[in-house]
Image (cartoon, rainbow, N blue to C red):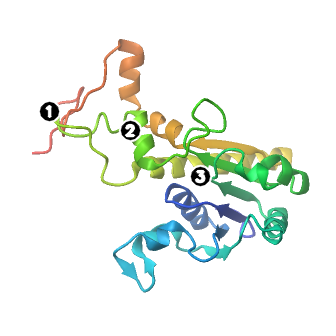
Amino acid sequence: MLKNNMTTWCAMQGSCWTLCYYDIRRFGAEVIKVERPGSGDNTRAWGPPFVGEESAYFLSVNRNKKSIAVNFKDPEGTKLVTELAKICDVLVENYLPGKLNEMGLGFEELSKVAPQLIYCSVTGYGQTGPESHKPGYDSIASAVSGMMHITGPEDGDPVRPGVAMTDLATGLYTQGAVMAALLQRQKTGRGLHIDCSLLSSQVACLTHIAANYLNAGIEARRWGTAHGSIVPYQII
């Protein structure tokens, strides 16, 4: 369990980041979700079905959180976020690399006034590299990583998994990284910057599929409900 007075806040939209914070909330942290003024998080409208005015999707991954609406482009909003960082333990954001820096809300800026802050950036392709400037979504990262290529019938086309597996995996990897950073901060007394991405998280989940190619040169293919190494395995 986390200490009862640990406070985290997230400036992000979507499902992988919200899953990370749902689990952190279960461990005892107070979670403050920062949303855009007016419409709020995109997932509020991801329906049907709806429960009252909120989508069941939004409620499923955002329960036990508090929400505030802040305009990051307004000086007052920037000031509010900076003050919030001073009293929080963890920040998780999913802006394109450099966007929050332009607003004075990047890791370098906030760590000057909040040295205790663990700042976690979640993007499609990481903070550096040739693809880092591109936005990332579950379905795109699922395709680029090879997850879709190995999913579906043997003689059919690649298939998107039935749930947002890349988002969910990234949320769990993000949660683990945040927990590890909290342990490190107990030793150093300082926060740090965590770099998590959809692509790296999904590639890590390929496990033996990637190992087969790296070690034996076996190219992955679709097996339907069968398995390339284990029999019997099919769903009867």
Q: In the rendered image, which residue does mark 3 sit on?
A: 175
Density class for disc 1 (Cα within 10 Å; few <14, some 14-19, many ≥20) is few
Image depth: mark 3 or mark 1 in front: 1
Residue at left offset 31%, top offset 20%: 219
Mark 3 neighbour density, 10 Å: few (under 14) some (14–19) many (20 or more): many
Q: Quadrant of the C terminus?
A: top left
Q: Nearer the viewer, residue 127 or 66?
A: 127
Query: Residue 157: x percent and y percent?
Result: 21, 37
Task: Tell me if 53 is positioned left or right of 48 in this view.
Answer: right
Q: Secondary structure at mark 3?
A: helix
Q: Residue furthest top?
A: 216
Mark 1 element type: loop
Q: Which mark is residue 23?
A: none
Disc 3 and disc 2 in contact, CB within 8 angstroms: no
Q: Residue at label 1?
A: 155
Q: Which circle's residue, 3 or 1, is located before the other in the chain?
A: 1
Q: Which mark is residue 143?
A: 2
Question: How many angstroms separate mark 3 from mark 1 (CA)?
Answer: 37 Å
Kind of residue indicated by mark 2 = Ala
The residues tagged by marks 1 and 2 sit, at their Cα atoms, a distance apart of 18 Å
